[in-house]
Amino acid sequence: MSSLRRGALVFGVLALLLFADGIYLVAAHKNPNGDTGVLFGNSSYYLNAGTVVVLSGVLVLAASVFMWLLDVHRQDKERARRSARAPLTREQPGPSGGPAPRASAGVRPTSEQAEDPPTHGQAGRPGRTASNA
C-alpha cells in the first residue's frame, strides 16, 4: 500500500470522526462556551460549532478522496508503463479470456521444449545435455 493511499485512509477516518462530532453538536444544539462565528464576515449569518465541524469534515473528506484518486491514477500510469516495456507474446487466450496455461497435467512438452539443454543459469548435471544424454 502506498503512502498516499495510507494517508487517504487516515484522512478518511479523521473525516468520519469530524462528521460524528459535528452531527452530535448540531443535534444537541451545543455551543461550547457560547461560541458562534460569522461566515466570511457576514454578520447576519452565524454558524454554530457543529456546523463548522461538519464543514471541516467535508473538506477533509474531499482531500482524502483527492489523495485516493491521485494514487489510483499514479498506479494506472505505472501499470501502463510496465506493460509498454513488457515483451509482446503470442499466447492464445484461455477459456476465461486470460492467457492459456503453458503446461497442464497430462500435456507433454513440445519437442523444442524437451530438447533445450541447460544453460549456465539453469540447474543440471555438469557436462550432460539433453542431446548427449
Image: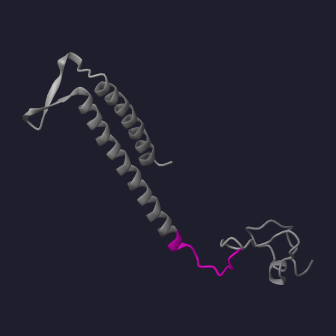
Quadrant of the rendered structure where residue 133 is? bottom right
Point out the residue furthest to the right here. Answer: 133
Q: Where is residue 89 in the image (x, y as percent from the top left)?
A: 63, 79
The answer to which of 70 and 29 lies nearer the viewer is: 29
Q: The magenta stretch spans which residues? A: 83-94
Residue drawn at (37%, 30%), measured in percent from left and top? 20
Quadrant in which residue 99 is drawn: bottom right
Say above or below: 52 vs 65.
above
The residue depicted at 29 percent of the width and 34 percent of the height is 54
- Please give left or right for residue 108 compared with residue 53 in the image: right
Which residue shows up at 16% across the image and 25% down it? 36
Residue 91 drawn in magenta: yes
Q: Using the image as rendered, state which of residue 50 and residue 7 is in the foreground.
A: 50
Query: Based on the displayed image, in which of its 4 quarters is residue 105 positioned?
Result: bottom right
Residue 103 drawn at (x, y percent): 79, 72
Asked if the magenta segment contains residue 13, the reply would be no
Spot occupied by residue 17 in the image (x, y as percentages of width and height): 38, 31
Picture coordinates of residue 39, whole percent (x, y): 13, 36
Work out which residue is located at the far top of the displayed protein and give it: 33
What predominant SS class does the magenta segment belong to?
A: loop
Pick whichever, 71 or 23, lies toward us. Answer: 23
Q: How is the image coloured?
A: one colour
Q: Residue at coordinates 50% horizontally, 65% vertically from top-left?
A: 79
Looking at the image, how many numbered discs can be counted on the residues? Answer: 0
Whether residue 55 is situated above or below residue 80 in the rendered picture? above
In the rendered view, tell whether residue 57 sits above or below residue 75: above
